[in-house]
Image (cartoon, rainbow, N blue to C red):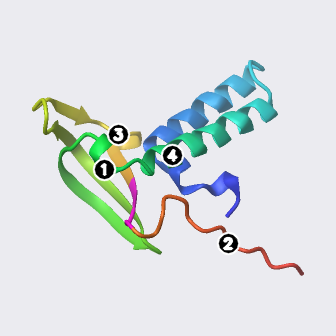
Amino acid sequence: MSSDDHPLRWATLGESLIEILVAMKREKQISKKEAKTILSKFDQTIEASMLQPPSKMQHGNLKGELRSYNCLDGMWKIELRKAELELSETGELIHLHGGQGGILRIIAIERGYGAVPQKRQKMNK
């Protein structure tokens, strides 16, 4: 798997980052190399946060209308409409509108599979 098709980049946060970087490149505010460096750092930071023990994470209840779900090799992709997150500790209710069309995209990796999907080997021809 190349860094360009890293699955976490296609979550709402990753898509938003890519849109911003494309706009900045178009306006010549950053170079292609700088954009790749930022995306690489994004991947590393997200993966590191996924490896934190559950005791350091906030807990809550997520509700919404299920649009679609899929599981492949221990990686779940879930899409919700009208999503709401209620934090357990504070009771705070957060409305999650998601990206395009108000859809929240979630990518979750099953415990035991690790946070980093295994890289696919490219065949030499």
Local packing at callout 2 (Cα closer than 10 Å; few below 14, some 14-19, many 20+) is few
Quadrant in which the C terminus is drawn: bottom right
Residue type at mark 3 is: Gly
From which residue to which does the magenta span run?
Answer: 107-111
| Residue 84 vertical placement versus 118 (above, below) | above
Predominant secondary structure in magenta? strand
Q: In the rendered structure, which amino acid carries the disc numbered 2?
A: Arg
For the residue pair 3 and 114, the one nearer the viewer reads as: 114
Q: Find residue 106 and report its horizontal and vertical position in percent.
A: 37, 52
- x and y percent of residue 22 in the render? 67, 32
Measured in 3D between alpha carbons, the distance from the residue under mark 1 to the one under mark 3, in whole angstroms, is 24 Å
- Label 1: element kind: helix
Q: Residue at x 75, y 23 (%)?
A: 30
User: Closer to us: mark 1 or mark 3?
Assistant: 1
Could you say which disc has been placed on residue 48 in the image?
Answer: 4
- Placement of the N terminus among the 4 image quadrants: bottom right
Apparent side of residue 111 relative to residue 39 in the rendered image (left or right): left
Disc marking residue 54: 1
Question: Which tag, 4 or 1, sits closer to the chain's start?
Answer: 4
Q: Position of residue 75 (x, y in %)?
A: 43, 66
Q: Nearer the viewer, residue 116 or 94?
A: 116
Distance, label 2 to label 4, CA atoms, is: 21 Å
Q: Circle 3 sits on which residue?
A: 98
Q: Earlier in the sequence, mark 3 or mark 4?
A: 4
Q: Say which residue label 2 marks.
A: 120
Tell me if residue 26 comes above or below residue 122 in the rendering: above
Element at label 3 = loop
Which three-letter amino acid code belongs to the residue tagged 4?
Ala
